Amino acid sequence: MRSETATNTDTKDSMCSLIPKYDVFVSFHGPNTSDDGFLRHMNEAFSTNKILAFVDKGDEILPLLVKAIETSLISLVIFSQNYASSAWCLDELVKIVECRKKDGQILMPVFYRVDHTNVRNQKGSYANAFAEHEKRYDPTRVQQWRSALNESAKICGYHSSKFSDDAALVEEIVNRVLKELDRVKRINSKGLVGIDKKISHVESLLETGSKDIRRVIGIWGMNGIGKTTIAEEVYSRLCSDSDYEGCYFKANVREESRRHGIMSLKEELYSTLLGEQDLKIDTPDGLPDSVKSRLIDKKVLFVLDDVNDLRQLETLIGSKLDLFGNGSRIIITSRDKQVLAGRVDDIYEVMPLEFNDSLRLFNINAFEKNHKNNKEYKELPKMMVKYAEGIPLVLKVLGRLLRGKDKEVWEDYLGRFRKNIPIKIVHQIFRSSYNDLNRHEKKIFLDIGCFFNGLSLKVDDIQLLVKDHDNSMHVELESLKNKALITISHVNVVAMHNIIKQSALEIVREESNGDYEKKSRLMDPDDIYDVLKNNKGSEAIRSLAIDVSIIKELQLHPKVFAKMKKLQYLDIYSKEYSRDFVRSRRGLYLPQGLESFPNELRYLRWAHFPFASLPFNFSGEKLVVLDLQYSYLTQLWHEDYKVKQYASTFEGSSSFLRQDLANLKYLKLDSSTFLVELPDLSNATNLEVIDLRLCTMLKNVHPSVFTLNKLKKLDLGGCFSLESFESDIHLTSLRYLSLASCTALKEFSVTSKEMVKLNLERTCIKQLPSSIKLQTKLEKLLLAHSYIENLPESIKNLTSLSHLGLQNCSKLRRLPELPPSLIILDASGCVSLENVNFPSTAHQMLKENKTRVAFWNCLKLNQHSLNAIRLNAQINMMKFTHQHISISRDHEYDAQGTYVYPGSNVPEWLLYRTTRDSMTIDLSFGNHSSPLGFIFCFIVPQVPSEGFILRFNIEIDEGEEDIQLYLDKPRHAIKSDHVYLLYDRGFSRYLNSRVKDQPKFKIKVTAESQTLTRQYVPLMMLKGFAVSPINTSQYLNFVQHLEMAEDPSILSSSISIVNILLLLVFILLLIRMFVC
């Protein structure tokens, strides 16, 4: 489902780009006279001091308001007695706290005539406000508000009770704001870019406002990322602005301790803090009592930069912070997270700069101050910035290297980068990190940098590929991560920054002393070309990776790999997958065939593998990954050869026919269009993924596949020749099975209790096996374009099923009762569908959570089914709307719920209805403090053209705003009128903000259909549309009336009464709000 909202400023992004960057965002709640007077004085002071402030008056469009918070340096929150009564303000506060955590935004709380403990613990007027909120809002949202208040009130702020009058309070706040702005100006004057929020984030972690605690903060990140710079700026500000009795900054502890010894640094540290020259300390562990006694009451600030060994910390500051007085603050920077873990209160990870900040930093260093890029340089800075990937050190060094140079020099550097030649000074810095690694860590570091990076391999995969005998390399991988040399994503994918990768390649060059025949890892196309052409392989080679689409044409000897006996990783890939390339087989030629692969291979990928099988003596004993996509294989290996070779030795036994594949985890043979059979895979006991997509000549799957107890994913999509896929064996681990577009498949019966997704689209199967009921973990069942005639009654027992795809199942006549877990149901194009068995009781229906249901072109549905669908649509749409109107407005997820079924009339339960293309919405009653959700309905006429998208143009007040909603439709023609119900959270948020100031407005709707050429053609006039505002009270009343009509025999007849009651309830609620 796709949705976009656009205004007459073109797009949401363009709207936000018009917002300036504010100095201060002010969050408050009136209309208390004292509060307004205080705020007026504050605004006047801001204006006098040229402080740009955004004051939320409650009339801003929500996206603009959120952007204003995000782009402000400081958020000033004025907590008054009635602040918590405003859901609007509380939502602002949640966003402000989020920005403080994420971006280090400065949060300045002002407790105006309210005790901060009442704010923190929600007592007094705050307790009364929350008692009301809990009746009206989602519990999750209310808890977010409570957490935001609690966190904000912990921050040292300004208490009006401590000032003689408002003027003194305003003066103190303005002075603090000016001081923060001056600090930012100083940072900018130094040419530091994108660092202000990072500094603020570290300061917030230090909790400098809390005087009675000691705090130690770690700053962690890769070399050159800006750790030292951030620490220097924080130290400079705190040391000059605060009342620390001793300050000390030691840069490069790692190198200084190597040169002068750690004890020398220890004496220097405490001499400086105590203000005593030539202090002597003889004990590595601890401090003399005379030193301790003088430190215990002393508030100190110090920074230890680039600490790389836990023993350094233990010697310098010990294991406890009770050496120093209350209010002391310590900052430690390190490239090794393990050094900081357990020794600091919080760790701040320094992330790379965003692109715009990177470009600005590069330009500052690459060009003169008043220089304007001419056209020939226009794209080159962007390309340099892309190479640097947000590392400040690289951006500065590269900018200075290119400053004043001709365009040819810039292009020469780009050429070097493409060849993975690093900048010398940058490489030296990363080389020092490499030198600190142990033997195993170095090996894995080079393996990742020179081979695995970019292959999207997970931690478990890397561990299998690099394991040393039976020793797992988990500790080494974790160490590389902690040293910021690799990253591990939230889905456990291992990656390496491009700059670090270049250093890894350079280290390999250095260790071979320029002799590429001695290189352990080959990636350079020229080196590989020479090694392969002249058969110069050696035992030194551990990995080889080459893109055959760029290599010069090369004829290889059949024993090309014979000398590479220790080769473990071989990747012959192609970034070019066109049919012409596959047919040409250009790149590598082996006219005499290939005799063998090294037996040590663990990773083998060879795209477009040119032979009908692997070599006769192939051994897969150590293989973890076997990837031969787009190959010319007819069979994987020659089992007939093994029969002849070993028959005399293993007479009467068949085990010798099977490869020893105990380490194999991935088998990828997709698009091997000549493959006709699979071998016996019984010995592949650790195999998890088999990819056989588009193996168009594959007629069957070897029975051994069904015995693989660790198999998780099996993809046979597009195996056109496959006619049957059946087994009596219940697989124990299979989670994903695809037989999509196996157009000859008629027989299917495979079961796995772990199955999560089953795709049988475009097959010839007519029914699901009875064992489907056992697959209770199944979440997604796709049967589109199949010959399915009925679904088993047991489908209701699939309690995890959330998505059922039945598009264009032309033989399907009946839908049985479906599980309440279903979220998406698409029965579009089921032209024979007559009966739909939806729940008949309110209790059952209210358990459902359908968000997307489509019955496009199901024109044979009987009246009973249509009535059930209409009621089901109303309940699910109202429930979905209710769930989303109570979500905090800054939530990034703009949810959308849709329900489509045949029909020509707008449902009666919708409040505002018309058969024209426009109408007036009047919500003038009440103050609308309770958010509304707006359900839309469109009566879509016949659409003869093909295409996938309907575009609804919604004009507000004759062109003042123009909103566009993009909604799905069946590709082929819409053959009759359809009711299209829609709730779009983004659009509802917009209408909510509008209703607050302009509750009466006119809506006009036109519709267009996208053609296959992506053009939009107008539809004839819609046969009607409707809008219905829904609030929490209305929904709860609706549920109550449904539950009263629990008897199935009266449920349908009572729905009209319920709808009339809904209308009355909504009017009464509006009147009550108006009177109040």
Image (cartoon, rainbow, N blue to C red):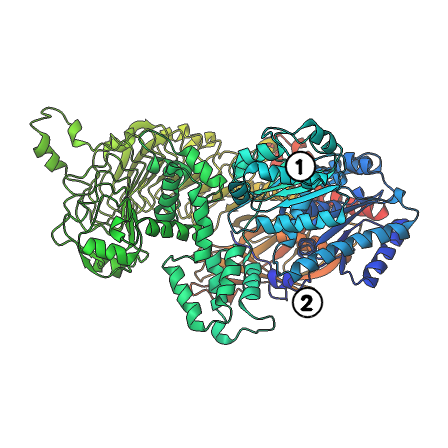
Picture quadrant of residue 194:
bottom right
Q: Name the residue under label 1.
A: 279
Q: Residue at x 54, y 34 (%)?
A: 310
Amino acid type of the residue that numbered disc 1 sits on in the rendered structure: Leu
Q: Which of marks 2 and 1 is nearer the N terminus?
A: 1
Question: Tag 1's secondary structure?
Answer: loop
Amino acid type of the residue that numbered disc 2 sits on in the rendered structure: Glu
Identity of the residue furthest to the right in this view: 164
Picture quadrant of residue 1059:
top right
Give the camera-side residue of 359 and 332: 332
Percent across and percent down for residue 932 are: 70, 48
In screen coordinates, is 716 left or right of 1044?
Answer: left
Q: Name the residue under label 2.
A: 958
Which label belongs to residue 57?
none
Q: Residue at x 67, y 48 (%)?
A: 234
- Vertical arrangement, residue 977 with respect to residue 717, above or below: below
